[in-house]
Amino acid sequence: MNKISSIKFLAAAFVAVVMTACHGYVDPATLPKPTPEPEAGELILTASKTEIEATGEDVATFTVTFTGEESSEGDEPTPGPGGDELLPVGVVRLYADKTVVKADGTDFVNFSVIYGTESGNEDISEGPTTRLVYTFNGQETKLGYGVHRFSTTTPGTYTVKATAYRGGALESENEITIVAEQSNNSGLNFFHKQLGMQFTSIGCQNCPALSTSIKGVQEAMPGRLIAVSFHEDFKYEDPMTLAISTKYHSHLGEDGLPRFFLNMRKGDIGAYQSNIERGIENHIATYPPTCGVAIDTEVVDGKINIKSKITSATSTVYRYEIMVVEDGIVDMQLGVSGDYTHNNVARQVVSGSITGMRFNMGEALEPGLEYVVERSVEIADSWNVDNLRVVVCALTTPDGGDSYVVNNCNECKVGQSVDYSYAEAAPAMASYNITRAEGKDVTSEATLRCITTGETLTGNSFSTSVAGSYTFEATYKDYTSNRVTITVKDNQIQPEPPVTGESKNFVRHIAVMEFTGAWCSWCPDGYNLLKLVFDTYNYTDRAHIIALHDNTAGTDPMGIALTNEINNAFGTVSFPGFVIDLRDAGEIGSNSSGIRDALKRSDKEYPAHSGVAVKSEFDVATGKGKFTAKVFANTADTYRVAIYIMEDGIVYPQKQGSLTIDNYTHNHVVRQMLSASYKGDRVGDLIAGQEQSVEYEYMLEDGIIAENCHICALVIDSTGYVNNMNICELVGGEADYPLAD
């Protein structure tokens, strides 16, 4: 049984509450200040001013300063991918776009792995056997195959190499040292609790030994280990199995049972108590937390209301994961005579995703402030409420989003609360709170690059007539500077629109992505709730359902990979769920307020400043189609379009409550996407009054009935949100710009 479908949520969207903490907050000003120390070998970028006018004559002048001793070693900068030289055959070399990052989890080093072949240099960075390996505090960590980005929330020095397999094991001839600098630390020092992930099954006769080791560790190291046991089917069907168990296990690797991992990091720790204790000690020393977690829970009307709170010591982006865990489940267990008591059993992972959910809408937390998110989970009949616990984990990514690891976590019994836990003493921050030493002016020798445009400056000054925000960094030898942002204010008279460019009074149409599945027993009710909200608040003609089916359970032939891609990106949690205008996401539960409020935001906060006209031509005999979308801009901006083919009238069995409706009709089902991504294909930078067309030629995929299809175009502006949309029939359909009377 897929437990995802058995959950409804009261809270539809992130609470996204930012407030001064009512408890657990420590004023950084009251903490002792470490003794500042100068840092050698640092490149410092400064600007004469950070705000200029868009006149083309107002100038910001940059200065680049290098601190530390000059050295004959490392004078030559690391060449780009492959450099200008031809690598010898069989040689692997590693390159990096910078060697200094902020330890905030959002500043990334991009690596290139180059392999010398007889025909020349080959970029194998994304190869299926290529992986990065970094060493920190004596501990080696392997990133996933093909992952070539690195970030961290732990300051310090990292040594990175590359490995690959080409007819034999290969290793890069060089290593690159990455320095992660402390980012805006508040001085808060949190107690580090470890998430222990046990993979087990009632059919695994060796698994009880690991359970015994876990209990021993918790007694020997009080408060350090939060254990969650993920059951899988092995030899027998395990009634405690969750679909996400195999997802976690597959991602972490190490086939077989039992397995034990710490903090969602790859590398099996082992089943012996001594191994687990040693692993915990290594993680405490190597990955100090940047945040703390507090939890409030209550049971109301058969639901667990969960308030998860995170306070960060640094400006860092986090995701979060909520797990419901049960102790004291009596069931069979191979290798044990009689009934066996299973503890720490994962009953529900709220997101249904191994990457968790976005916290604070994906924005970095301000140090020292408390951020809150609320979720509600329906208690299943088989759960014993008295034995339930809630585990909340704060996640960060070391590899640009390929995986997420636990930064810190906490737990409490259902119906109770738990506050932040602090370490006994403040950490030594002297090496990160620095006073910059007098340095050498290397402006004339440095390279200045605009990160925003990708252009390299000629000289050390910048001016422009185009308003916006421009970010710069400098490189000198093996060093990369801090980044400086210049804000360019628009004082220019807007150009006259072209002859065809009179402003249009567009009607705002709203894209409502529905996350559903034939296996999901709550989803028909979710669809009906959407329609009810549309009717009640007069959105019937302007809100359009785009149904994204999921095949996680293997029982929905309408499921597509795009569903999980968008679901993971927005942390939509469970099914049924929604994403409105690629902006607001949440659960479709009994509470309709989240949907209603998101629809209102589209009208009030994001009114239409663009429109799209659509035309579809289709040859039923050949299955070939041509689709044209014309985008008109009332406001100058960068526009993209995302194109979906949707089919109505698909008859396929649908779970509804405890019943299965054999002749259920599925409508608005996304069958094919013409754009390269749900984020849209670029239309261009349009000025006010400008129109631009894009065309798509395609073959309709097998099994899709063209006469039952509609095709829609979503216009996405520079915010990444849908600003407007339009829809027409696939066969001979056409719809002009939606204009108000």
Image (cartoon, rainbow, N blue to C red):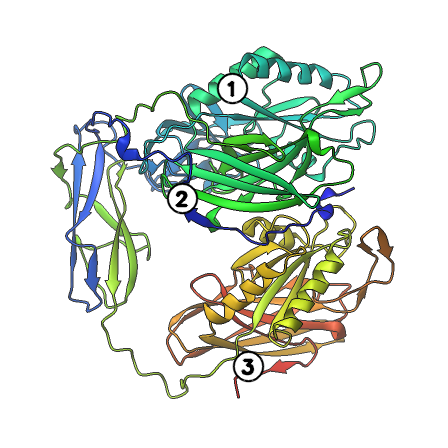
Q: Amino acid at mark 2?
A: Leu
**Residue at the disc numbered 2:** 365
How crowded pointer 2 is (Cα within 10 Å; few <14, some 14-19, many 20+) is rated as many
Q: Are marks 1 and 3 in contact (CB under 8 Å)?
A: no
| Gap in angstroms between the C-alphas marked 2 and 1 | 27 Å
Does residue 3 appear to the left or right of 405 in the view shown? right
The residue lying at 68 percent from left, 52 percent from top is 575
Label ID, residue 280: 1
Judging depth in this view, the residue of 27 and 138 nearest the camera is 27
Q: Amino acid at mark 1?
A: Ile
Q: Is residue 45 above or below residue 660?
A: above
| Gap in angstroms between the C-alphas marked 2 and 3 | 40 Å
Q: Amino acid at mark 3?
A: Pro
The residue lying at 73 percent from left, 56 percent from top is 523
For marks 1 and 3, the one nearer the N-term is: 1
Does residue 359 appear to the left or right of 3 in the view shown? left
For marks 2 and 3, the one nearer the N-term is: 2
User: Between tags 2 and 1, which lies in front?
Assistant: 2
Please state the horizontal and vertical placement of residue 340, each as a whole percent of the image: 79, 19
**Residue at the disc numbered 3:** 738
How crowded pointer 1 is (Cα within 10 Å; few <14, some 14-19, many 20+) is rated as many
Please state the horizontal and vertical placement of residue 3, each as a whole percent of the image: 73, 42
